[in-house]
Every structure is written in C-alpha cells, then in structure tokens.
Amino acid sequence: MTILPAQLTSTLSDVAARYRRKSDAVSTAILWTLITLLFGWAAIFETDLLIAGLIVGSVLALGAIGLTLIYSILGFANFAHGDTMMLGAYVAFFLLTGIVVGEKPNIDLDVGWGLNRFPGATAELADLSFGWGLLVAIALSGIVMAVFSIGLDRVVYRPLRKRGSGIVIFAMAALGVAFSIRALMLIIWGPDPRRYVQGIHLAHHYPFGVVLKTDQIFIFLVALGLAAVMYFVLFHSKLGKAMRAMADNPDLALVSGINTDRIVMWTWAIGGGLMATAGALLAIQALLKPGLGFELILPLFAATILGGIGKPQGAFIGALVVGVTQESSIVFVSAGYKPAVAFVILIFILLLRPRGLFGTTSS
Amino acid sequence: MTLALEATGLIAGYGEADILHDVSIKVERGEMVAVIGPNGAGKSTLLKAIFGLLPARAGEVRLGSEDITNHTPDRIVAAGMSYVPQIENVFPSLSINENLEMGAFIRRDGLADRLEHVYEMFPDLTERRRHAAGKLSGGQRQMLALARALMLDPTMLLLDEPSAGLSPKMVHTIFEKILEINEAGTAVLLVEQNAREALSFSRRGYVLVAGENRLEGDAKGLIENEEVGRLYLGES
C-alpha cells in the first residue's frame, strides 16, 4: 500500500508535536518553579512586599486583560493602553473636582461643577481616604472611556481594518494614539501631578510586618472583583464566548452568524471600562501624571506575554507575577529600577518561552 | 419542484480578477448536489460568493424565494443557510459544547433542545462535550464542523471539501453522515476534489471548469460520462 501524502504529513506533524510537547513541558516547569520560588521567598521573608506586589499586580491585571483581549480579537498590540488608562484616571479626576488647567500653567480653572460639590460626597467612607464622590466618578469614567474607545475605533482602527492594513500599520497607529492622548492630558490638566484627595492618611499595621492603608485593600478587592466578573463574562456569557470564538477564528465567527462588528464594539467597551478603572485605582494610591501611562506599557506587556498573549486568565496571573517581582526587587536594587525589572521579565520570557504560561502552539 | 437555492449568472473574484465568469446552479429542496472540477475551477469561490463572503459583481442568489445576493453572512445564516469552510472550521480553544453554541449564536430560544438533537446525530461528540475542539482528530473535527453548521436547523447546507485531508475510511464515514443529514431534510451543496465519492452520494452534479459551467446532470450519468471520467475520476 502506498502512503498517502495526507497520512505522511500527519505522521510528520505528530512527531514534531511530540517533540514540541516535551520541550514545552520543560520550559513550563522551569517557569512555574521560578514563580513558586519567588512567591515562596517573598511570602516568608518579605511579606510586606508580597502584599504590595499583589495589590499593584491586581490593578495591572485589569489593564493586561484588556490588552490581551484587544490583541486576540483585533489582532494588534495596543501601545496606547497605558496612556488610555491615565486618561481614564484624569477623566475621573475631572468628574470629581471639575478642575482643568487655567490660562497660566500654575493657576487652575474650576469649571464650576464636579461630584465633590454634592453634600457628603467627600465624607470619608469607613477608613478610606475618599467619599462616594470618587466611586461614582470612577464608574462614570469607566462609561466615558468605554464610549471613547468605541469612538476611537470608529475613527482610527476601523478604517485600517477595512483597508486590510498590516500589523505594523496598526502598531504605528496605536503609538500615534498614545502620543495624542498624552498631549491631550497635558493640554487639559497640565504637567503638574494631581491627586484625588488632599491630606495625609495613615497606614495600619498587620501581622507579619505588613503595613497597609485601607485604600490599598479597597483597590485590591475592586480589581479582584472586576477580574472575577470578566472571567464570568468570558466563560459563561454568550457575548464572552463569542469574543473567544472571534479570537480563535474570526472568519468562522462570521460564517456562524456572529455579528463580528458588534463583538469588536463590545471588546472596546469592555477594554475601555477596564482601562479607566485600572487607571483610577492606580491613581488612588499614587499621583496622576500625564507621563505615568507610558511607564505602564512595559509591565502591561510583560504581564500579557508572560501569561501567553491572547489568554485573559494568563494575563491575570502574569500581572500578579510582574507586580510581585517589581515590588520585591527593591530588596536588591533601587526602586527607580522597577520599570527595568518589567523589561528583564519580558526579555526572559521571550527567550525561554515566548508563548508564555498558558499559550498554545498556533495550529 | 421548489428550489432551495438558485444562483444565476454569478460573476465574482478577488480584487480585480474574476474567478467565476458566469456560473449558474440550482439545488432543489432536500436535494444533495455535488460541484466537481479541477483545481482553480472556482469551486470554493462559488460557495463564498453564494454565502456573501465575496461580493458578486453580477448575478443573483436566491434562498427559497428570498433574494440574498451580497447579504452579510449573519443575515444569510438567519435566512436558513449554513456554511462549513474547508479548513479551520472549528474554534480550537473553545469546548465542543461552546463550538455548538456559537453555531446557534443568533438563536434566541430552544438552544438546549437543539443541542440534544445535534448530540444525538453525532454521538461521538457527546462524551467529549467539555473537551477543547483543538484536541480532536481530523475526522472528529469535521464531524464537529458539520454539527456546528446544523445548530440552526438550516434548510440549505454548503460544504467546502468535507473530505479534505481525511483518511479514505474517514472520507466514507463523513459522506455517510452528510447523506444522513440530507435524508433528514436539509438540502446540501458540496464542493469536492474527491469527485467519485461525492457524485456517488449525490443526486445531481455540476462540473465547473475555469469559472464556468461545463457539464451538469444526474450524478450517475456524470460518473459514466467519458469526459468526466477521463478528466476528474482518474480513468484513462
């Protein structure tokens, strides 16, 4: 009997697959071992840094989930992700205070309205540093940024899709959007740092040398809650399944009768909402600065690639690992090197296992 | 006899170049029809033009009594026609169950009943409901692709090379399943390289050459036709 070409190629691909699986298993094992060692070491000797890392990581995760969704469904790396996060934080700031930069850079202009003007909006909730005004501002900013992202897609990315542009064109367009958004933030709110709430708020001491502000616990819980909602949406709702289907095979999604334009719209809406929330949560425990978004790009991409690009659950784990690694790096190097730490993780992953923790071979 | 599908005078292609020059095809209600022809004859292009994936520059496509020329695929699916592409016809990272749910994306109710019905038609898939489709063998994938296309209980099914890349034994199994689907009432239009097998299961056939109708008729007649035999069935 002659060997049919189809059978021959399938035999060859079987052999190749078996080899890949073997080297796959090794690199996965190395990666998980390193992560376990890192978390184990931090848990025992640097509990405070582990907790701080998990908090930063949980917020990064919201950005990374959006980034990975946009990558898998729209097929490009959204370099504007960090800057859009900051814009979301600024929009929340504006909704809260009604402040923009005045004619002279150091004199602010109050437009005369803002959630802070409502009675009781600034009264501190429980042990938090802010009142319900900020919560409403963040939620509204999420909606604003969802609409903004859909609009941006209509104006910038959809025409490129219609034209069948390549991945490099999309990356350049995203970079252009990033610069524009940063310039916009500078124009509207100026270069000086802003904060949601003035005043000093003390941290509390917990066992194992952990020092935390209640704000940080709030940030962690909100981020975790939203990640859980995203998991439910992606794996248990019709919309989420259609999003994953489109990430798998957009052509088949189209012929299955899925309205792919609408899925793209929802992807931007969800991505935009997550970006705004993540940006605002970060700004609660840090400052608002127009340039901060750019610094987020590296950890966001490191987290996304570590988890396996296109995998939301991977982006979540990846972000926690990046957060903990960055925070605990201050034991060895100056805190100024935190962005470099993300860069080192990125290069390490690309060398050892470019597909990341949960990535599969593309077939 | 009422027609399930009728395409008349289709002209379509990629970019500037036309691949279909003037193709007409009819499928009667509940009928199984094969389109055969050499590589590059425009067989797959014909299905894409019918399904609205490629713009038809001229001609008309009717599904039953409805004009669906150049409608978007989601509207065509809603009108009662499904399509199974030749390759990449499952969602690899989704489970079998999710693949089937995506086939019924536009369905608003009765999903559970339809799922059970389709699982009964494809018992092999039932035990693997939660498995990722990417882990299935070639034959199982093809079965899943067929099952996905049946989730809306279409009146008309378009199949692009359902036997491509399968072992000879599996080819026969797939064709028997397609015949079973057809006998349950769905009209089938399939495009095939495997001309003999396709014709032996079909009622009628079309031979497409260089984007034009060359021959058409009774499937048995085509198998016995001297020209068809020489050109496409590998007889000397």
Image (spheres, helix red, strand yellow):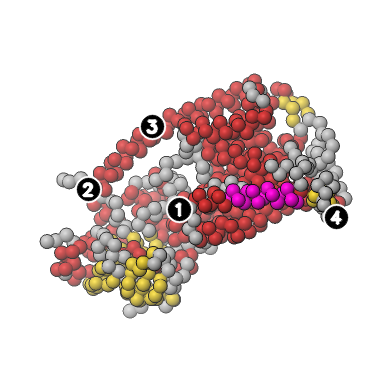
Q: Is residue A190 left or right of residue A257?
A: right
The span from disc 4 to disc 2 (Cα, nearest Å) is 78 Å
- CB atoms of marks 2 and 1 within 8 Å: no
Residue at mark 4: chain? A
User: Are the numbered discs 3 and 1 placed on the same chain, yes or no?
Assistant: yes
Q: What amino acid is found at the position of numbered circle 2 in the picture?
A: Leu
Mark 3 is surrounded, within 10 Å at the Cα level, by few (under 14), some (14 to 19) or many (20 or more) other residues, namely few
Judged by its main secondary structure, the magenta piece is helix
The span from disc 1 to disc 4 (Cα, nearest Å) is 50 Å
Mark 2 is surrounded, within 10 Å at the Cα level, by few (under 14), some (14 to 19) or many (20 or more) other residues, namely few
Which residue sits furthest left? B236
The tally of labels here is 4
User: Are the numbered discs 1 and 4 placed on the same chain, yes or no?
Assistant: yes
Q: Which mark is residue A4?
A: 2
Asked if residue A52 shows in the view, the reply is: yes
The span from disc 3 to disc 2 (Cα, nearest Å) is 28 Å
Element on which disc 2 rests: loop
Mark 1 is surrounded, within 10 Å at the Cα level, by few (under 14), some (14 to 19) or many (20 or more) other residues, namely some
The residue tagged 3 is A22
Q: Please state which of the two labelled residues, at mark 4 or mark 2, is closer to the viewer.
A: 4
Residue ID at (12%, 61%): B236
User: Of label 3 and label 2, which has the lower sequence position?
Assistant: 2
Q: Nearer the viewer, residue A15 or A227?
A: A15
User: Are the numbered discs 4 and 2 placed on the same chain, yes or no?
Assistant: yes
Residue ID at (18%, 61%): B233
Quarter-of-image position of residue B63: bottom left
Quarter-of-image position of residue A266: bottom right
Which residue sits furthest bottom? B1
Q: Is residue A176 magenta?
A: yes
